Image (cartoon, rainbow, N blue to C red):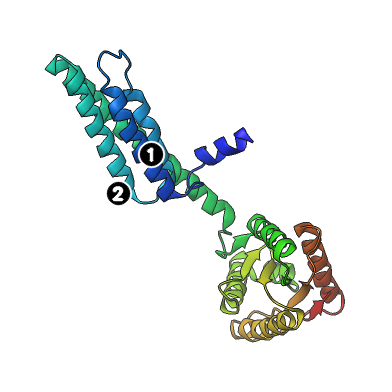
Amino acid sequence: MKSIRLKYIATPGALPSNSVAIISYFVMAFLLPLSLIPDSGISFHALYVLPIIAIALHCQRTGQVVAAVCLSIVFQAITSFSSSFSLISASTELLIAIVVSISVAYVARIARHNYLETKHLASVDALTGLHTRRTLESILEMEVARQKRYGGAFSLAFFDIDNFKIFNNARGRNVGDEALKLFAQILRDHTRESDYIARVGGDTFAMLLPRTLSGECVSLCQKISEKTAHRMADASFELTISIGCSTFEQAPQSALEALLQTDKAMHVAKQNGKGRTVSL
């Protein structure tokens, strides 16, 4: 349990930014009177880096980081000039505090940027800009958990471009990529804000439709099939799609079960002549 909590603390963006900022500012304000205790012999300068790191990792706004660094420097300046009998000593301590505060904030900020950029690249398909299979599985797991708790229904659809390997070999990879991007755009054009679309394989795509019953799902899939045939023909791509869809009015045991059932429906569509929609 402790390791899970530490993981959230150390993961950029995992904690609410406003809460982190308020707590961090409070910690710095709490350190100031402790540092001013006469003859305590204890230096609290090093502890100021902790709230700075927390804000730099979890807060999106740069202004919050700048405010934390400035507040830290001001408080450490008050401490240094209040407790030191030497102006040179106090100035040196303050210079060190400035360098450390800025350096820590900069490094933590870079770490946040790199982490979030890597996370984005892992969750988005580079060619189509859609979600990846891993992201879809995570979203589907949350949808299954929501349904188990609150009820309702959701639908899942798989789309496979028929004879794509033959097309790709005949027309070339660049043309194949254009066909994939075109189909991704067709899916975007037919989804609501609450829906999720992903590229789950080379020429296989998926769509998760929360709060959608079977009739609505099948109707949408047939519409996508017709649109795809027309737009592919307009682009001189002789391609159709096979679609398998499933609606879950009762929560499946797991996200994997929902994926397997929908994948089975898609394969039935391909075995029955391709270019059609099958619902299981």
Residue 24 is labelled as: 1
Image quadrant assignment for residue 80: top left
Compared across the picture, whether 53 is left or right of 147 comes to: left
| Depth check, front residue: 25 or 89 | 25
Q: Mark 1 vs mark 2: which is more N-terminal?
A: 1
Image spot of residue 75 (x, y percent): 25, 31
Image spot of residue 203 (x, y percent): 69, 66
Image spot of residue 30 (x, y percent): 33, 32
Residue 270 position (above or below residue 61)? below
Question: Looking at the rendering, in which quadrant would you find the N terminus?
Answer: top right
User: Is residue 110 among what the camera can see?
Assistant: no
Kindly state the secondary structure of the residue where label 2 is placed.
helix
Compared across the picture, whether 247 is left or right of 200 comes to: right
Few, some or many residues within 10 Å of mark 2 (<14, 14–19, 20+) = few
| Depth check, front residue: 198 or 77 | 77
User: Is residue 34 among what the camera can see?
Assistant: yes
Residue hosting label 2: 63
Residue type, label 2: Gly
Compared across the picture, whether 183 is left or right of 50 comes to: right
Residue type, label 1: Ser
Q: Is label 1 or label 2 in front?
A: 1
Image spot of residue 43 (x, y percent): 32, 18
Say which residue appears at 65% left-offset and 81% top-offset. 228
Compared across the picture, whether 63 is left or right of 16 comes to: left
Do the residues under discs 1 and 2 have CB atoms within 8 angstroms? no
Image quadrant assignment for residue 192: bottom right
Say which residue appears at 57% left-offset and 38% top-offset. 5
